Amino acid sequence: MGKYELDKACSMILRARRAFLSVPGSGALVFIRTDQEQKVRRLAIEVAKSISQDEPAPVYVVQGHVRGEHSWPFSRIKKNPRLRLQPNGQIETEVGGLIFPQDRAIVLLVEYFDCLEPHDQRAYTHLVDGEGGEWALHEGSILIGALISSNPGKLEAGASNRGLHFELA
């Protein structure tokens, strides 16, 4: 794991994204170790500006360190079943999908990724590796797992092995 300034880390993430785009339905998974939350947020914004020609890609944030009723287990990002009225007048139950857009590439910043439960860490990684099925983010999306140096969390080995690792200077 190298230690990089913001612009160099952004460049390396975009290069990794291009490599992942060669696998249909995939996005990039990167883990960023830093000493400050704000640094990785700035990085996410810069990456979002760079992956879209028209306007910056949306950046969504999951706060991995929050506990209790406001925590972000993987199950929370799935849409609940909902009713949909079809043109023929029938009501059907629609299930599946994420609370994030799945019709365009996004940047998903998971702060304190290593504070998530191990099964949630693995589930989040599947959003961009082509194994997410109906829960996958749009091709070309980037998931940034932020690892804050002062955090006592543990990164699950199966999740860790799926992504690239960088450290922000």
Image (cartoon, grey):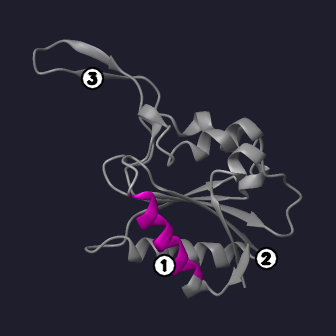
Contact (Cβ within 8 Å) of mark 1 with mark 3: no
Front-lying residue, 21 or 97? 21
| Residue farthest top in this picture | 90
Please name the amino acid that badge 2 sits on: Asp
Residue identifier under label 1: 46
Q: Residue at x 38, y 66 (%)?
A: 57
The mark nearer the N terminus, 3 or 2, is: 2
Residue 131, image x and y in percent? Answer: 50, 37
Quarter occupied by residue 41: bottom right
Q: Residues within 10 Å of mark 3 (few under 14, many from 20)?
A: few
SS of the residue under disc 1: helix
SS of the residue under disc 3: strand
Relative horizontal placement of residue 101, taking residue 27 as reference (left or right): left
- The quarter of the image holding the C terminus is bottom right
| Residue farthest right in this picture | 152
Residue 95 sits above or below residue 156 on the image: above
Q: Tell me the distance, in whole angstroms, between the alpha carbons under discs 1 and 3.
A: 37 Å
Relative horizontal placement of residue 163, taking residue 10 as reference (left or right): right
Residue 76 sits above or below residue 169 on the image: above
Q: Which residues are magenta?
A: 9-21
Q: Tell me the distance, in whole angstroms, between the alpha carbons under discs 3 and 2.
A: 46 Å
- The quarter of the image holding the N terminus is bottom right
Relative horizontal placement of residue 151, taking residue 103 as reference (left or right): right
Kindly tell me whether residue 58 is visible in this rendering.
Answer: yes
The mark nearer the N terminus, 1 or 2, is: 2
* Magenta span includes 149: no
Please name the amino acid that badge 3 sits on: Arg
Give the label, 1 or 3, closer to the camera: 1
Please name the amino acid that badge 1 sits on: Glu
Quarter occupied by residue 141: bottom left
